[in-house]
């Protein structure tokens, strides 16, 4: 008798979030990127469809990064000084389909750039490159509440993904995103309850659940990866079981975490960081990550290959 | 040693104390009640006094602002006496003695007597102590039985009784007494577990005067009831604050306090002092002679009973959390310091474990939960919330430490449910104007538990706060920043009795959110642990001090109680006191209480892996899992 595979039937599905608006949708992007839409646990194609491949966004900063190890800053060379050139290099040389800009320079401790300066930068960036954008504040709540509305306004109609909304500071950001037609990143501290509560609070303000991407907060390989993995798995199980408030796709800041690892900073083993970033990314893809923000072009290449292999079967 | 005189206003009481005594200790020693939730650690900021005259030394504190310092306001617990003093206790720091005996608690008793019917079981009338009038045949040469044998013989002739005993002091006076009253005597027979004691021998017939008192000793409130043991009639009910509250607002701080020098003695005399005062008032009001008060039944959580009996409660809070005694033999009330007839008896309702005490047993008894066919749950909302689940086949109970927020403690404008406490709130969705009703229709002084539940429900409904408990209303005269996050003004100072704004801030909401999460998640985990669904529960008995004014819709809206069909909820008021009264009046009920206490399985929440998850998920209004609180037909 042939072996009968037992398949799980799921009643829910992950919502699809579209990042970027092309001409016909009122924006200026060359294409839009869709993430989410899974109807099964990661890559159990027999149980349900997985219509969208995980996407990788290259991370760029508005200032010269001060804590990037040599191994990861080397490929970008002098472009690190100029966010526009840096962005252009990612798209031109590494075929980046989406970019993630972190406005660290607006942080009071890292240059304290004004909201106007940052808005100008975003406008220029939108002209320079045509890929969809993920835009992050500096993480300073008070300053983000000034900067993010300004850049949201500056990028109006481009359907960016803007973040991050956190439990204690979400109202201003959500209101801007809502007004200017963007999507939002809801960030929770590796806590499934807070993740869900934040999604409810944001949707209570009138932003559709289909415009939220969850940042569950992750740890790199050896630095709490399995903790993040289990939180993501639990969230995804809830989504597939029909909980709409947990059905947002995940964004994972892989590069940021992987390149903080002691192993990645080892100067005598320059490839170790690439391996660290690759392994962290592939593990999180198996946990259900939909959008990965990464740093090293080689790591990105490897992970893309891995994704293609997953979908080849 | 230097001694100084301290006079407290407005009570106008004076006491002489040694130098370096704290103002709070001096106040306690002369019976002036000052609020103190932290037990004198200087952290709650409740014990504010004005030093009118004299010298004091104080420690730095962040609980006073500059204006208060200018007005010579000090915290009584960290301020020591260095000369003769005149001290005024600030209105908000007073524990109002007039509200002690009336107010909401007497109202809750009305409910209770109605709800006592919820259990239709009527126990056989056989009080803890009974009186029996006897006319003994005088001895003669043919009948030379001793006086004591003669007495026992006569008692056995009247009633079929097991082993009998009596005390030496009775025997010493027996010869004279019997002959002095021509062998006509009344004996008081007390049930001391399986034996019967001749508690008292009195000349002549006093059998129509036999009274008892029952008490529910709560962490925050003590309720007492005077009962005519012959007619079963309740003569009077009183409630007052547990004076132990000056040493800490929850059982854990009191257990810690008990370890301090003479701590346990102070706690013991605080509780017995309160009880004796209530007994005195009850007997005077109802013209009962203290000597005709022959027995007392007490219930309360395990810690309260330990402190009542001056038993060290230390091991209750140390792993593996074992109390010294759950089942206590019937004792003499005077041994515990309770003033009734000097030979009168004291029985305590048996407890289950360190954190599920005799109050739960009494609640299960009086609610009739033990006798139900369907699955029922008893939720006793208090500082130490207890939840019992079961029916006639099984009983399981757990305790959830909710903290004192629902009793108005640990929140900025909280107060206990007494005169002037806001108990109902209505917020207009248009202009956010606030309408409140207070207990006794008095000028508002603060907010009590049921008021907070209503308030949060209203703030949620009108969008003043979001579901995480943060104030989201902006640019409104009622909303402003404070040291504890934003605050919302309920009553402006012009209209409040404390001449201060009555507010709720984000820290208060957080506190209340934790308290409601503790009660709800304990209920949910207990039900789940027994492999039931909340919907399987057919009846929910709600007990507690604010059972009368608790708005069920509001309680569900904030996620304190599970969202079940409203007709399933039954208010039973002070179920513990009702159970204690049943034990006072019936040996059958006593026996049953013992059975119940043995039958209840204690479920320790802290060892359940799901409890923390449940608790975290409940830290949202009404709950992170919105499916549990769906709008539905009522």
Image (spheres, helix red, strand yellow):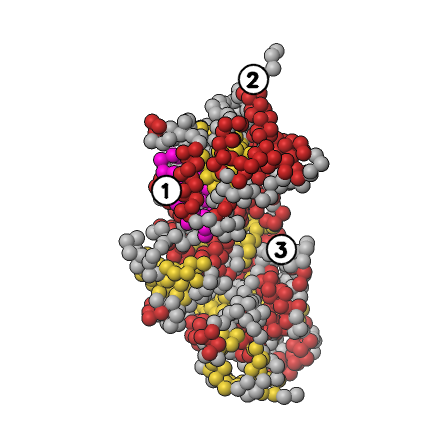
Q: For this rendering, which residue is in front, B288 or B516?
A: B516
In this view, the mark in front (2 or 3): 2
Q: Could you tell me if residue A168 is visible in this image?
A: no
Chain bearing mark 3: B
Do the numbered discs 1 and 3 sit on residues whose CB atoms are within 8 Å? no
Q: Are marks 2 and 3 in contact (CB under 8 Å)?
A: no
**Does the magenta segment cover residue A160?**
yes
Q: Which mark is residue B353?
A: 3
Q: In this view, which residue lies farthest toward the left?
A: B430
Residue drawn 46% across the image and 62% down it: B483
Answer few, some or many: residues within 10 Å of disc 3's Cα (few below 14, many 20 plus, some between 14 and 19): many
B425 relative to A269, above or below: below
What residue is drawn where x is 62% and y is 52%? B598
Say the numbered circle drawn on residue A153.
Answer: 1
Tag 2 secondary structure: loop
Residue B174 appears anywhere in the view: yes
Magenta region: which residues?
A142-166
Given contact means CB atoms under 8 Å apart, are the residues at marks 1 and 2 in contact?
A: no
Q: Residue furthest front?
A: A78
Q: Position of residue A241 (x, y in %)?
A: 48, 31
Q: Quadrant of residue B139?
A: bottom right
| Location of residue A90 in the rendering, given as x and y in whole percent from the top left corner | 52, 31
Are labels 1 and 2 on one chain? yes
For disc 2, the marked residue is A313
* Chain assignment, label 1: A
| Residue A2: quarter of image | top right
At x 36%, y 51%, the residue is B463
Q: Chain of mark 2?
A: A
Q: Where residue A164 appears, x then y in whole percent?
A: 47, 43
Q: Is residue B75 left or right of residue B559?
A: right
Residue drawn where x is 41% and y is 27% of the image: A30
């Amino acid at each position: 008798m042939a072996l009968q595979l037992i398949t799980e039937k799921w009643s829910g599905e992950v919502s699809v979030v579209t990042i970027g608006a092309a001409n016909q949708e009122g924006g200026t992007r060359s294409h839009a990127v869709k993430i989410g839409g899974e109807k099964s646990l990661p890559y159990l194609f027999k149980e349900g469809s997985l219509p969208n491949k995980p996407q990788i966004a290259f991370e760029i900063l508005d200032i010269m990064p001060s804590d990037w190890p040599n191994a990861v800053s080397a490929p970008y060379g002098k472009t690190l000084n100029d966010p526009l050139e840096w962005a252009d290099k990612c798209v031109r040389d590494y075929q980046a389909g989406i970019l993630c800009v972190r406005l660290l320079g607006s942080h009071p401790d890292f240059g304290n750039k004004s909201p106007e300066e940052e808005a100008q930068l975003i406008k220029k960036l939108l002209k320079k490159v045509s890929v969809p954008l993920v835009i992050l504040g500096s993480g300073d709540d008070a300053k983000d509440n000034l900067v993010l509305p300004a850049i949201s306004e500056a990028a109006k109609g481009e359907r960016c993904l803007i973040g991050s909304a956190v439990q204690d500071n979400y109202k201003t950001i959500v209101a801007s995103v809502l007004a200017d037609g963007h999507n939002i990143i809801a960030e929770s501290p590796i806590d499934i309850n807070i993740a869900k509560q934040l999604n409810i609070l944001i949707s209570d303000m009138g932003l559709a659940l289909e415009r939220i991407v969850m940042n569950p907060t992750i740890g790199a390989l050896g630095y709490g990866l399995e903790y993040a993995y289990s939180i993501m798995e639990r969230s995804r199980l809830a989504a597939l079981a029909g909980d709409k408030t947990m059905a947002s796709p995940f964004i994972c800041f892989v590069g940021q975490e992987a390149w903080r690892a002691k192993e990645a900073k080892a100067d005598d083993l320059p490839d170790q960081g690439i391996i660290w970033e690759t392994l962290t990314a592939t593990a999180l893809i198996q946990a259900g990550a939909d959008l990965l923000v990464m740093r090293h072009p080689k790591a990105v290449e490897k992970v893309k290959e891995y994704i293609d292999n997953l979908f080849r079967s | 040693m230097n001694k100084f005189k301290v006079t407290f206003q407005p009570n106008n009481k004076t006491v002489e104390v040694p130098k370096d005594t704290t103002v709070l200790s001096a106040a306690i020693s002369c019976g002036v009640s000052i609020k103190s939730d932290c037990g004198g650690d200087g952290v709650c900021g409740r014990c504010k006094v004005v030093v009118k005259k004299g010298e004091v030394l104080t420690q730095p504190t962040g609980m006073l602002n500059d204006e208060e310092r200018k007005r010579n306001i000090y915290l009584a617990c960290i301020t020591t006496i260095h000369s003769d003093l005149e001290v005024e206790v600030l209105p908000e720091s007073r524990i109002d003695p007039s509200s002690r005996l009336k107010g909401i608690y007497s109202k809750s008793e009305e409910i209770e007597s109605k709800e006592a019917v919820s259990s239709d079981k009527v126990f056989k009338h056989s009080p803890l102590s009974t009186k029996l009038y006897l006319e003994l045949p005088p001895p003669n040469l043919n009948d030379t039985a001793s006086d004591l044998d003669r007495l026992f013989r006569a008692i056995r002739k009247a009633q079929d009784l097991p082993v009998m005993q009596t005390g030496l002091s009775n025997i010493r006076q027996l010869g004279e007494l019997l002959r002095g009253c021509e062998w006509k005597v009344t004996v008081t027979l007390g049930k001391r577990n399986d034996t019967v004691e001749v508690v008292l021998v009195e000349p002549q017939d006093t059998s129509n005067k036999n009274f008892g008192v029952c008490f529910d000793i709560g962490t925050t409130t003590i309720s007492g009831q005077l009962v005519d043991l012959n007619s079963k009639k309740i003569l009077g009910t009183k409630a007052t604050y547990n004076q132990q509250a000056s040493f800490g607002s929850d059982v854990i701080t009191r257990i810690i306090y008990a370890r301090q020098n003479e701590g346990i003695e102070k706690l013991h005399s605080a509780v017995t002092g309160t009880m004796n005062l209530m007994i005195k008032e009850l007997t005077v009001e109802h013209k009962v002679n203290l000597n005709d008060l022959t027995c007392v039944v007490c219930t309360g959580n395990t810690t309260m009973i330990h402190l009542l009996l001056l038993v060290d409660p230390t091991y209750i809070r140390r792993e593996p959390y074992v109390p010294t005694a759950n089942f206590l033999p019937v004792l003499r009330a005077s041994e515990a310091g309770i003033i009734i007839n000097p030979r009168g008896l004291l029985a305590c309702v048996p407890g289950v474990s360190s954190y599920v005490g005799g109050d739960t047993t009494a609640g299960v008894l009086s609610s009739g939960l033990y006798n139900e066919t369907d699955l029922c749950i008893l939720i006793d909302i208090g500082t130490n919330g207890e939840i019992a689940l079961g029916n006639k086949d099984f009983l399981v109970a757990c305790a959830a430490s909710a903290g004192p927020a629902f009793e108005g403690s640990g929140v900025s404008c909280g107060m206990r449910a007494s005169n002037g406490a806001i108990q109902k709130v209505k917020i207009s969705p248009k202009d956010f104007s606030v309408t409140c009703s207070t207990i006794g229709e008095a000028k508002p002084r603060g907010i009590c538990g049921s008021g907070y539940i209503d308030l949060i429900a209203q703030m949620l409904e009108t969008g003043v706060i979001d579901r995480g408990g943060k104030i989201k209303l902006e640019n409104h005269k009622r909303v402003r920043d404070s040291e504890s996050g934003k605050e919302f003004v309920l009553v402006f100072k012009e209209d409040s009795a404390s001449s201060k704004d009555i507010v709720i801030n984000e820290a208060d909401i957080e506190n209340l959110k934790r308290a409601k999460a503790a009660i709800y998640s304990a209920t949910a985990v207990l039900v789940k642990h027994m492999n039931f669904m909340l919907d399987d529960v057919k009846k929910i008995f709600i007990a507690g001090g604010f059972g009368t004014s608790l708005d069920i819709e509001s309680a569900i809206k904030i996620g304190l109680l599970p969202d079940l069909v409203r007709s399933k909820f039954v208010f039973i008021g002070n179920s513990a006191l009702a159970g204690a009264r049943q034990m006072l009046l019936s040996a059958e009920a006593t026996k049953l209480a013992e059975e119940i206490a043995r039958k209840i399985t204690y479920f320790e929440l802290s060892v359940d892996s799901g409890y923390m998850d449940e608790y975290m998920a409940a830290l949202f209004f009404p709950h992170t899992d919105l499916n549990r609180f769906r709008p539905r037909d009522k």
